Image (cartoon, rainbow, N blue to C red):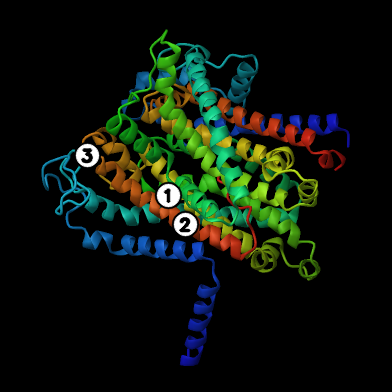
Amino acid sequence: MSNRDLGSIARGIAGHWHGAPGSYRVGAIIMLLHFLLGLFGPLLAPYGYAAMGTSLPMEGFSWRHVLGTDALGRDVLSRVMYGAPTVLTLAFSGTALGFAIGTSLGLLCGYLQNWFDELVQRLCEALISIPFLVLALMAISAVGPELAGKPILIVLVVALVYAPRTARLARSAALEIVTRDFVTAAKLRGDPAWRVAWQELLPNATGPLFVEFSLRAGYAPVLVGALGFLGFGLHPPTPEWGLMISENRSLMFVAPLSVLGPGAFLASLVVGLNLFTEGLARMLGRSDVVVRA
Amino acid sequence: MDVALLIARRVVTSLATLLMVSAIIFAMVELLPGDAASRILGREATPENLQVLRERLHLDRPALVRYGIWLGDIVQGDLGTSLINGRPVAEVLEPRITNTLQLSLYALLLYLPMTLIPAIVQALRRGKPTDHGLSVLNLMLLSIPDFLLAAIFLIVFVVWIPIFPAKSSVPQGASMLELIRALTLPACTIAVAMAAYAVRMLRDNLIEVLESDYVRMAELKGLTRLQVLIMHALPNALVPTLNVTALNLAYLIGSVVVVERLFAFPGFGSLLVDALQLRDVPMVEAMVLIASAVYIAANLLADIGTILLNPRLRRA
């Protein structure tokens, strides 16, 4: 790649950045900070995530322990920093998996519009009708003790919650596109359904799909946190933020920072993602996206 | 199309969805690969235990027959028997559901002003600092997970300003005042979490309506801004908000689980978590089915409401 190419890409990014709404930019910066925390947090943490007795238990703020210590005398800030990559990885891989499954199914269904479409739609409808936290908890409890507490289970559960919702959106996006001429052309050319979905529908549905991904990703850390909080997520001593809030909630009255610390990190991540989504939606001319259910 | 036919069709679809939900629940809980009995018992499995449990779950029969039996019983009002304490599921559920209904109604009561007032203020002051300020606050609240919100409420209103109890379990025969005092914090948590989400929607809808021709007409007629808002804009903006509220219910049910857990409130949600942890299969199946039925029913009602309120949909 020549310097001129690089220069034009850089200008393109800069133009994109300056044209973007403020919420998009603030959201992107917050997300970048969280990404850096996820990358370097464990390296920079002053104590180990399971190092007990680093000080007296249940301490409040001090310069040695900015967020205090928990009941076992573990440094809360270090645990938060160690937890960052875990939270980010779980939330994003779960969202990505659910998004990939949902998008492929939804686009395919929107193109086929046959019995398969009907079947998938009914199934998605039913899955959406089970309140998502209940669905997630039931799935975790159903797979039994061997997988309990494994990160892969959390990823699969997030995907299970998101896939039907994404499929519904992808299908409705596809319905608008299949009426266009280039889809008919591809069909007459004899392209198989999956190729039409992949080559014709997907590139034309990126706008709403990107917003959907960003929206779902914004809620994923909360879902992962809620599972951890209820004791259905990762097992201790993993420093997952939701689990930490749950573990430290009995200390809430003695050392409130041990709850508010991980809470503030979790909330700021979600704020960043939400701001980003809002700005993105505004850039793409869609204001109707904040649908959490 | 005839309104009655439209509604009838919606009712049938809802029932079909519910049937599908029951199949999914059954499949997830009982049909996952491996032996359901050993999954339920986990480490406590002994050959004798497994044998007893297999018989009680009718595991010797084909899955489709078991599903038929289970569904047949439920349709006849028999929710089964708890594996943990041997009591009928319906009997265990009843007081819990009553408790949760009280909590949800209280939350819903708080939710209405929490949604209407900020949305109206924002719509009237759109583009001004008040609007932006409330939007930022709204986004913050939207981003705070409910379990964290509950924890913050506990720290503020139980520790710093001790006006509410930390545990929200209400003894039998407690007075109305005690009940309200115990339920306020959990109800507020649920209401704030739900309102944060609906305010945006209502604000956007209100602004859209305020820019329409008939609102300009009403203004030219000489009505004040507030009169226009309450008489013309609000009724028209309520329909989409009604739908959002119904969708929000899926969130409310999740919220109830988390909030009840944190406040040690003996309701539906905390019972569900217990039943899941103890792998009380009949209890879990019945509870998930009820939770889904509530959600489906709420959406059905919202749809019927929309059909009745919006004449344009009737002709579609």
- Place of residue B92 in the rendered image (x, y in percent of width and height, measured from the top left): 47, 14
Residue beneath disc 2: A273
- Place of residue B25 in the rendered image (x, y in percent of width and height, measured from the top left): 56, 31
Earlier in the chain: of badge 3 and badge 1, it is 1
Q: Residue at x 42, y 10 (%)?
A: B175
User: In this view of the protein, can residue B21 be seen by the observer?
Assistant: yes
Secondary structure beneath disc 1? Answer: helix
Instruction: Read off the chain for label 3.
Output: A
Q: Nearer the viewer, residue A67 or B56?
A: A67
- Quarter of the image for residue B186 reads top left
Q: Nearer the viewer, mark 3 or mark 2?
A: 3
Instruction: Read off the chain for label 1.
Output: A
Secondary structure beneath disc 2? Answer: helix
Look at the numbered discs 1 and 2 and tell me whether their residues touch, using CB distance below 8 Å.
yes
- Looking at the picture, which amino acid does disc 1 mark? Pro
Residue beneath disc 3: A255
